[in-house]
Image: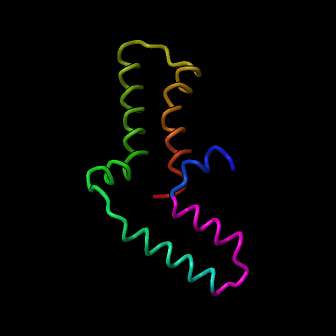
Amino acid sequence: MSLLDWFKSPIDKGLDIADQLVNDGDLAVKLKAAFYLEELRTKTIPLIDGIHKLGRQALALVQVGFYAWAAKNGVEITWELVAGVSGATGAYTLAKGKGG
């Protein structure tokens, strides 16, 4: 199990297990459908869900704002600075995974 597997949702873990262990194609489709339905039934807090869905865009906006502030105030933008500022967005993307 890799470090990124710890950040997967239980639904994603269940889908991975269904892919690895179920040989019958029809049964695998039924199991995946059941996992997706359970995910749709999950209760969420609308504000937190909205912030989570806009996470990448919000972090990108913060980056652009930082670079605008740095350029206005004469801060030298080096590769190290870019890597440091982009690190939060990269870590969030790794933790969140693909899509959504």
Q: Position of residue 22 (x, y in %)?
A: 69, 77
Magenta range: 10-26
**Is residue 58 shown above or below 12?**
above
**Is residue 49 shown above or below 17?**
above
- Indicate yes or no whether the magenta region holds residue 66: no
**Is residue 76 shown above or below 39?**
above
- Report the residue at 63% width, 87% height from top: 26
- Report the residue at 32% width, 63% height from top: 43
Q: How is the image coloured?
A: rainbow
Most extreme residue toward the bottom is 26
What secondary structure predominates along the stretch shown in magenta?
helix
Q: Position of residue 50 (x, y in %)?
A: 31, 53
**Is residue 48 shown above or below 42?**
above
- Indicate yes or no whether the magenta region holds residue 14: yes
- Report the residue at 45% width, 58% height from top: 100
- Report the residue at 42% width, 39% height from top: 60
